[in-house]
Image: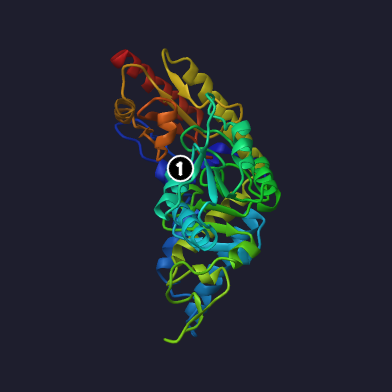
Amino acid sequence: MTFDAAAIRAQFPGLDDAQKGKPFAYLDTAATAQKPRVVIERMTALLGREYGTVHRGLYRRAAHTTKLYEDARTTVARFLNAERGEIVFTGGCTDAMNLVAHAWGQAHLKPGDRVLVSGMEHHAGLVSWQAAGFRPEPIPILDDGSLDLAAYDRLLAAGGVKLVGCVHISNALGTINPVAELARRAHAAGALFLVDAAQSAPHLPLDVRALDCDFLAFGGHKVYGPTGIGVLYGRKAVLESIPPWRGGGEMIERVSFAGTTYAAPPARFEAGTPPIVEAIGLGVALEWMMELDRAAALAHEEALFAYAELRLATIPGLRRIGTAASRAGVLSFTLPGAHPADLANVLDMENVAIRAGHHCAQPVMERFGVPATARASLGVYSSREDIDRLHAGLMTCVRLFG
Ligand SMILES: *Cc1c(COP(=O)(O)O)cnc(C)c1O
């Protein structure tokens, strides 16, 4: 299959939103991705004549939805090169990370045990641990926005590290972290490795066997699927070592007041009626992605990213935050004299949508000495025209604030 960028873009009704003759340049895919028509239409049908519960119905409708729900799990497993039993449906990436911090952490971490997380974690990968009662230590960031690997080695060598968590692609900097290598070093030190793939899942082919990670989390809404659904991959033996986190229906084997026995993973971690329509919608989105020529899609996104970097480099005074050799998808920047929110407001008048703020990564802002950045981020549907309109809007900002 060839990669036809215009035809792909045309599949996204959310992008068709011109205001006063100005087309919509959606450059906030790192916050959430627009949805292709197949996902919207499939989910609409699922809420209508195909709607039913899963796992307990004895009638055909429930058997139908159960099959679709479990087929979606198979799709996720294929997307990650995992086994079906290693795929837990969660409420999102944040929810998946909290499952690890709370359920795995509280079962396995003893006083004195250490957890390392990158200094560029999304708050989901940092605050989840703190909320669960732990104090993860940061792996420092170098000036270009890459991880300090020598410092990582020293942190590991000091001993007692039981788990290392790291974003695959930073949503604040765009840095692609060498997670397979980080996992190898973590394992050599006797620690498990957790990948936050929220930003990489939409861009890079993922293979949990090749990455050799123990956990990997991502959310549905950034991979062109719905909100309210996410995935936790856990290596089989690791999932089996974790007691239940939330109790309720679906996750039990046998219940009595004298004591309850629990289902095996993944059901053990899916208490209650799951997000049925969302899980199936996620499966549709992943099938849609896997049907793309992924090498061509990646090449398209890389070319567009390179183009965006060149265009931003021509804006007088613009400071890029995050210039690591390996980066993708996300362009963070500041402009002297303007708060990032001012930039976002001016661009919004041009119907160009970017994000301004700390991007749920306040330690990163602190590291680079800025309260916030403006961030443009790309998806598979992004175009050169989007970038050109960003450029034109930023030139207006230079005139207004410069
Ligand atoms: C968006 C994001 C999250 C949170 O994902 P949700 O699915 O919205 O909970 C976590 N980590 C990173 C790097 C993100 O970009």
The amino acid type found where label 1 is placed reads: His
Rendering coords of residue 264 (x, y %): 58, 73
Give the image's coloring scheme.
Answer: rainbow
- What SS does tag 1 mark? loop
Looking at mark 1, is its residue's CB closer than 8 Å to ligand 1? yes
Rendering coords of residue 401 (x, y %): 30, 16
For the residue pair 213 and 296, the one nearer the viewer reads as: 213
* Residue 26 in sight: no
As drawn, 236 above or below 164: below
For the residue pair 198 and 147, the one nearer the viewer reads as: 147
Taking the spot 39% from the left edge, 36% from the top edge, the residue there is 362
As drawn, 32 above or below 255: above
Q: Quadrant of the N terminus?
A: top right
As drawn, 196 above or below 395: below
- What residue sits right under mark 1 in the picture? 122
Q: Quadrant of the C terminus?
A: top left
Taking the spot 41% from the left edge, 48% from the top edge, the residue there is 127
Rendering coords of residue 400 (x, y %): 29, 15
For the residue pair 73 and 304, the one nearer the viewer reads as: 73
Left or right: 337 with respect to 284? left
Rendering coords of residue 191 (x, y %): 63, 50
Q: Quadrant of residue 16?
A: top left
For the residue pair 348 and 248, the one nearer the viewer reads as: 248
